[in-house]
Structures are given as structure tokens and as C-alpha cells.
Image (cartoon, rainbow, N blue to C red):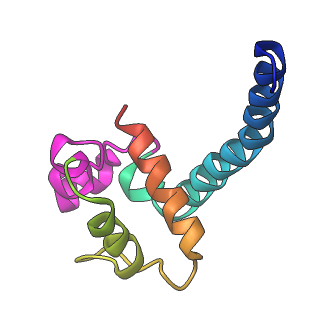
Amino acid sequence: MLTKTAWAIVLGLGVMAYAPISFAAEGSGKANYDKLCASCHAADGKGNPAMTKAFGEKALNIVSKETAAKKDDEMLKVIVDGRGKMPASGKSLSKQEQTQVLQYMRSLAK
């Protein structure tokens, strides 16, 4: 049986082993968001001011309460298939990358 100290070491090693994956996923989500989404949705997710004049803030603000209330499946469908004038990104992103973009988008609302 492991002592409390041994358990703390095991737990700490587990967290350290997972952390780089988590940070890499966030970095990849941000990089893809910056490349594919930020020109319309802006770096902060509130919508590029020039684009909101053309399409309206509601369409481009992805940090709104309405967007936050949407389920992940619904948001992933929009990322993959596009909506309205928003182009589809499904062919250019793997499923993992799609999820990473969604996670990064969700983090903007916090």
C-alpha cells in the first residue's frame, strides 16, 4: 500500500504528464482559431467591428450567452459545415482540431 507521500508523487507525475497535452491542445485550438475564425469573430470572440457592420453583432459574437448555451454538437456542426456566409472548416481540420477550436472558443467566454 502506498503512503500519502507516494500517492502525492504519483498524482503529481500524472498531472505533469497530462499538462503538456492540455497546453498543446489549447495552443493548437488558438492557432486554428486565429487562422480560420478571428478575421470575422475577432481575437476576443466578440466580432470584428468591420464585419459586425456587415453581418450584425449577433451573428459574429461567439462569447454571448446565447452561444454559450448551445451544445457542443451544435457548435461543432457549425464549425464543420459552416452557416450562412460562414465557410465550412470540416475539410481543413481533423476532428481533434475541430474540438480544440471549440474548446478555445469556449475559453474566450470565460
Residue occupying image coordinates x 54% and y 57%? 100
Q: In the orientation shown, which residue stands out farthest toward the bottom? A: 91
Q: Quadrant of the C terminus?
A: top left
Residue 35 % position (x, y):
58, 61
Residue 25 % position (x, y):
65, 52
Q: Quadrant of the N terminus?
A: top right
Q: Nearer the viewer, residue 101 or 54?
A: 101
Q: In the orientation shown, which residue stands out farthest toward the front? A: 1
Residue stretch in magenta: 43-68
Displayed quadrant of residue 16: top right
Q: Is residue 47 above or below residue 110?
A: below
Residue 10 % position (x, y):
81, 30
Displayed quadrant of residue 2: top right
Residue occupying image coordinates x 44% and y 39%? 107
**49 inside magenta stretch:** yes
Q: Nearer the viewer, residue 92 or 36?
A: 92
Is 59 left or right of 63, judged from the image as shown? left
Residue occupying image coordinates x 29% and y 50%? 62
Q: Is residue 100 above or below residue 17?
A: below
